[in-house]
Image (cartoon, grey):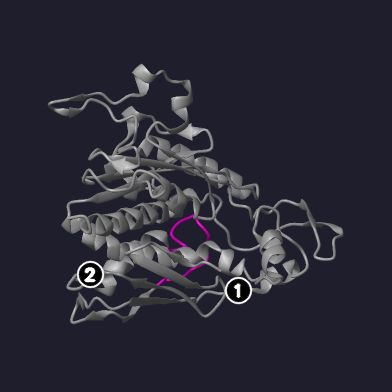
Amino acid sequence: MTSTFGNLFRLTTWGESHGKAVGVVVDGCPPNIELSEKDIQKELDRRRPGQSSVTTPRNEPDRAEIMSGVFEGRTTGAPISIMVMNEDIDSSKYEKFKELYRPGHADYTYEKKYGIRDWRGGGRSSAREQVGRVAAAAIARKILEKHGISITGFTRQVGKIRIEENEIDYGEIEKNPVRAASSKKAGEMEKLILQLKAEGDSIGGVVEVTAKNVPAGLGEPTFDKLSADIAKAVMSIGAVKGIEIGDGFRVAEMKGSESNDELSERGFLSNHAGGVLGGISSGQEIIVRAAIKPTSSIRKEQKTLSRSGRDAKLMVEGRFDPCLCPRAVPVVEAMVALVIMDHLLRQKAYE
């Protein structure tokens, strides 16, 4: 089972949803970077459950504990191990699913591949695994900040409610539970999510992430394109079903004269490419959008299959996010940060 990501800046996540703990080991972090548990906690707090009425009520404090690789407040160059204990576990709701596959989940495919599965909340296929990604990215972000690189995400769309370009206000993102970059649209999104939550249903959406001040020249021209690595990283998030960079699927409707980013002495005159040309960063803002599916666990009766191959019905009960977008924002940010961090180190090999 592959649980390692990255080339020079590498991370290996570990742990299961209802196991004792989850965590990550980060290898390849340069030495002498100031790092504390507070730096990691700040990002974990944005992803943790139980934040508001539009997220799962599972109440995990997600307290990060650095186990190795940091001495006197600085990284040593050794592997950095971070552990987060699972403290609010309730596996009782999942016992009925021992013999049933939940629609939309990895239950069926996981068992077909490995011949075994952890039915307690999905085990390794659970979004709980993402704690390690966000913790690792908190380290990467400390280094990226030294290079002036910032990464900001927000909920661009929930259902059919979408924030238009002229409505974006980055100052609003952390002021509302949906993490929307518009106070007006945030209210509409929250109302829709709570309505569907009351009905026992869920809703999907779009998370947008922008990386600013990324230097030109990161990425490779063939298989290790920066855009390709970002796509793989973001698509490795369980709830993501599609990704766009720049204008994305809109280019299918555009002419070359509309899609091309012309250049002048002042620089690029537009950014339809989303900051990546030929797989290499152009120095413009890197813009990534991820389509987030509706939460698969819903309180509605659905048809399914038992492990013995018989038709069955089930209704999933437990603690679930009615919309994954608010907590997905820091996760998509994390994967973009990890890719840029890795390519930044790789670029240094050329210098």
Give the secondary structure at mark 1.
loop
Does any portion of residue 188 appear in the rendered image?
A: yes
Residue 12 in the image, given as x and y percentages of width and height: 43, 70
- Identify residue for label 2: 30
Q: Quadrant of residue 85?
A: bottom left
Which comes before the other along the chain, label 1 or label 2? 2
The residue stretch that appears in magenta: 48-62
Q: Position of residue 189 (x, y in %)?
A: 47, 40
Q: Residues within 10 Å of mark 2 (few under 14, many from 20)?
A: some
Count neighbours of disc 1 (C-alpha within 10 A) and say few if under 14, some if 14 to 19, many if 20 or more: few
Q: Based on the displayed image, in which of its 4 quarters is residue 170 positioned?
A: top left
Q: What amino acid is at disc 2? A: Pro
- What percent of the width, then of the height, locates residue 166? 32, 28
What secondary structure is marked by label 2? loop
Q: Name the one closer to the observer, 216 or 118.
A: 216
Measured Cα–Cα span from mark 1 to mark 2 = 39 Å
Kindly identify which residue carries mark 1. 90
Q: Outermost residue toward the right?
A: 310
Which residue is found at the position 34% from the left and 33% from the top? 273
178 is higher (above) or lower (below) than 51: above
Q: Quadrant of residue 89?
A: bottom right
